[in-house]
Each structure stands twice: as C-alpha cells, then as structure tokens.
Amino acid sequence: MTAPTDPANEEAHLETVDMLLHLSRRSQAMVDRLIGCLDRMGQQEQDPERLKNFFELDFLALRMRRNDESLLVLAGGESARIRRDPVPLEEVLQGACSEVEDFRRIEFGVVEPGFVVAAPVVNDLVHLLAELFDNAAAFSAPDTKVLVEVRRVTDRAVILIEDRGIGIPPARLRELNQRLAHPAVQVGAVTVRQMGIGVVGRLAQRHDIRVELEPAGERGIAASVVLPAHALVG
C-alpha cells in the first residue's frame, strides 16, 4: 500500500520545480545571447592575447549554460536547443571535452569508429559526458590524464572514462551507483548541491543509458556509459 502524499510537501516541491524552471530558462536565454555576442567579437579580433581572453570568456559562458541546463534537467524540463540531425560519436566526445576546463587532460585511447548518435540524444549525451569528464578531472591529480575509450559490445556502444584519482570507498560507490540508477524524484537542497550526479542520472534515465562507477586498477574510478541500440543510428 502506498503511503499518502503530504499535500504541503507536494505543493512545496512543485513551487521549487517551477522556480528552477523559471530561473534556468531566463538565465539560459541571456547566456545564449552572450555566447553569440562573444563569438561575433572573437571572429573580428586579430590580437592573439585578446583572442585568448575571448576564448576564456566563451568557455565560461558555455559552463554557465550547462549549469542552467542542469537546473532545467533537475526540474524535469528539456533544453530549448534541438538537434535535427544525428552526429558521429567522435564529435559528441569532442563537444563534451570542449566544455571541460581541464580539457587538455582528457586523453582518447581506443575509439572504435562507426557509431552515430541519434539526434534527440546528442545534446543530452554531450551534457552527460561533460559532467563525467569534469568530475574525473576534478577528483584526480592535475598531472594525471583522464582516459576515454569507446568499445562495441553487440549492438551497443560502451564509453569508458577512467581517472587516476583517490578512489571512492565501497559504501559511497554503492550509494552513487544507486543514485545513478534511480535518480531522486524530489528536488531539494542536497540535490542541487550535488547536482552533477543527479543530472547524469536523469539524463541517462531519459534515454535508457546505463551509467555505472567502479574501481579502476590500483586507484581511481572508471565510469562506464552504455548506449543502447535505439540511441544510435545505423
């Protein structure tokens, strides 16, 4: 028997969701305008030093947009940006890499060719991978690499992201995998503070993508991202 829902809690939850949707969409519209403005100014700039500053500002704007889209995901909304054409998986990986501040530490190993990501999945997969790349870089030493590989397993694509960080205790690893497999429905302060794992879980759930964390070698963590056949084209 299902426990009755507390009307007050339900109303508070709906108000929180509505607030997140409103704030994220409003901020997203302004950030999109900022990115467009920076791109136009960068195309006209010839001075190498000033051009470098434009690139840095552009990256920060992209990071702000991903943050807004993360709030939108937690609130149950979808991005206004729509992909109409499928994209090769290699381009999706590069797109996610470009949104990571320590992108130079992302190293690609064996990437089996031939995978093409279905149009409705592309933006969410870029977002999901960028969150995992960011996390791997943040929790490993700055002089280490984050290794990314892609393998074919029957009709699925498996993306492996491996860092050389401090690792995660077994109990915490089980908790994180549980949250990835069953993302929280309710949005609260803890969900927002630990936004990355919740966003990855919800994006994965949206497309039946399986994300799992496990120990990697003597230290570090490996994240596996399994793309089902319906997320791929051909």
Image (tube, rainbow, N blue to C red):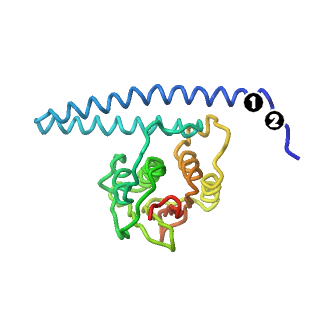
- Which residue is the site of mark 1? 9
Judged from the image, the secondary structure of the residue bearing numbered disc 2 is loop
Image spot of residue 198 (x, y percent): 57, 46
Image spot of residue 177 (x, y percent): 61, 57
Q: Quadrant of residue 151?
A: bottom left
Q: Inspect the image, locate mark 1, and give the three-letter code of the amino acid beneath it.
A: Asn
Residue found farthest to the left: 46
Judged from the image, the secondary structure of the residue bearing numbered disc 1 is helix
Q: Residue at x 36, y 48 (%)?
A: 100
Q: Residue at x 31, y 39 (%)?
A: 59
Q: Inspect the image, locate mark 2, and give the three-letter code of the amino acid beneath it.
A: Thr
Is 198 located above or below residue 146 in the figure?
above
Q: Residue at x 56, y 37 (%)?
A: 77
Badge 1 crowding class, 10 Å Cα cut-off, few under 14, some 14 to 19, many 20 or more, is few
Mark carried by residue 194: none
Mark carried by residue 5: 2
Badge 2 crowding class, 10 Å Cα cut-off, few under 14, some 14 to 19, many 20 or more, is few
Left or right of residue 135, residue 13 in this image: right
